[in-house]
Amino acid sequence: MAYDLLKGKRGIIFGALDDKSIAWAVAEKCVEEGAQITLTNAPVALRFGQINELAEKLNAKVIPADATSMEDLQNLITESMEILGGKIDFILHSIGMSINVRKKKEYTGLNYDWHHKTLDISAMSFHRVMQTAYEMDAINDWGSILALTYIASQRIFPDYNEMADAKSLLESYARSFGYHFAKKNKTRVNTISQSPTITTAGSGVKGFDDFFGYADQMSPLGNASAEACANYCVMMFSDMTRSVTMQNLYHDGGFSKMGMEPAVLGK
Ligand SMILES: NC(=O)c1ccc[n+]([C@@H]2O[C@H](COP(=O)([O-])OP(=O)(O)OC[C@H]3O[C@@H](n4cnc5c(N)ncnc54)[C@H](O)[C@@H]3O)[C@@H](O)[C@H]2O)c1
């Protein structure tokens, strides 16, 4: 059921690769709730992913942008404002990639060139997107900017490797830039800390299936799905959450507040 929560709003959605991507579900929900959006992803993802299918379904334009390139981001925001007919109301940053994980390096034996790249793609890109939009004065008053994160930024999940540090930095950027954007034009910036979700990026983490099951058992509501995350994003983009900013918001079925769950011990 749709409520027109985003009627008349314009948004940019990063990170829809295929129909398992969290950003895919968010894009669908935003349009269902009345928004007009542009979709973006890295040029290489446009070749291998299914984003064009989504674009056709939602009648949205795809604008390629490598989130580590300032030039690509400037072009993305300029084109989005042209296509959508004005300043932007919301942005979803749904980007993650760990080169060391991909190359099977342990946390205690990182390759630092790859680590730089991981931090650039998975965290600094968020600052780049915000700085580009800020300098271009591209966000409407009371806008809303979100990035997706994971609890390994705050608690130890050894197999999450260098991505834990990337997510800590990402969450810190939301707080720091959230201050400046609030002062500038009441734009809010938050991160949503999502349950493990079966996607291309998620499944790349070592032991993913085990900790997906563990988290599902530990969470009194069970793991939150991509669709539920999309609903939460819509609420955060809507005018119903105008005073929420600089927060890391857990969307995890209660996992982050748990100490012990008897079922996990087989009781
Ligand atoms: N899946 C999970 O368990 C889980 C849990 C919590 C948070 N998250 C976060 O959700 C976000 C989305 O991930 P997902 O699980 O939907 O997986 P996904 O693989 O579908 O999405 C990751 C996206 O990042 C994009 N990307 C990579 N490098 C890029 C670059 N240089 N420029 C632009 N885009 C680039 C990929 O093309 C892809 O679309 C990530 O930030 C991820 O860390 C995922």
Image (cartoon, rainbow, N blue to C red):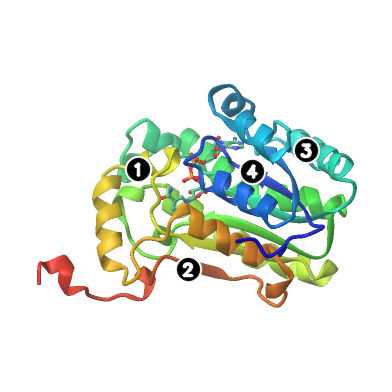
- Disc 2 marks a residue whose amino acid type is Tyr
Give the answer, above or below, for where 259 lies relative to 61.
below
Whole-angstrom CA distance, mark 1 to mark 4, is: 21 Å
Task: Give coordinates of residue 106: x percent, y percent.
Answer: 30, 41
Q: Tag 2's secondary structure?
A: strand
Q: Tag 3's secondary structure?
A: helix
Task: Give coordinates of residue 225: x percent, y percent.
Answer: 43, 56
Q: Tag 4's secondary structure?
A: strand
Give the labeled residue for mark 4. Answer: 14
Query: Looking at the image, which is closer to me, 75 or 180?
Result: 75
Give the labeled residue for mark 3. Answer: 76
- Disc 4 marks a residue whose amino acid type is Phe
Sequence-earlier tag: 1 or 3: 3
Query: Looking at the image, which is closer to me, 118 or 229?
Result: 229
Q: Quadrant of the N terminus?
A: bottom right
Q: Quadrant of the C terminus?
A: bottom left
- Disc 1 marks a residue whose amino acid type is Val
Q: Which mark is residue 250?
A: 2
Q: Is mark 1 within 8 Å of ligand 1?
A: yes
In this view, the mark in front (1 or 4): 4
Q: Are marks 1 and 2 in contact (CB under 8 Å)?
A: no
Whole-angstrom CA distance, mark 3 to mark 4, is: 11 Å
Residue 219: which quarter of the image? bottom left
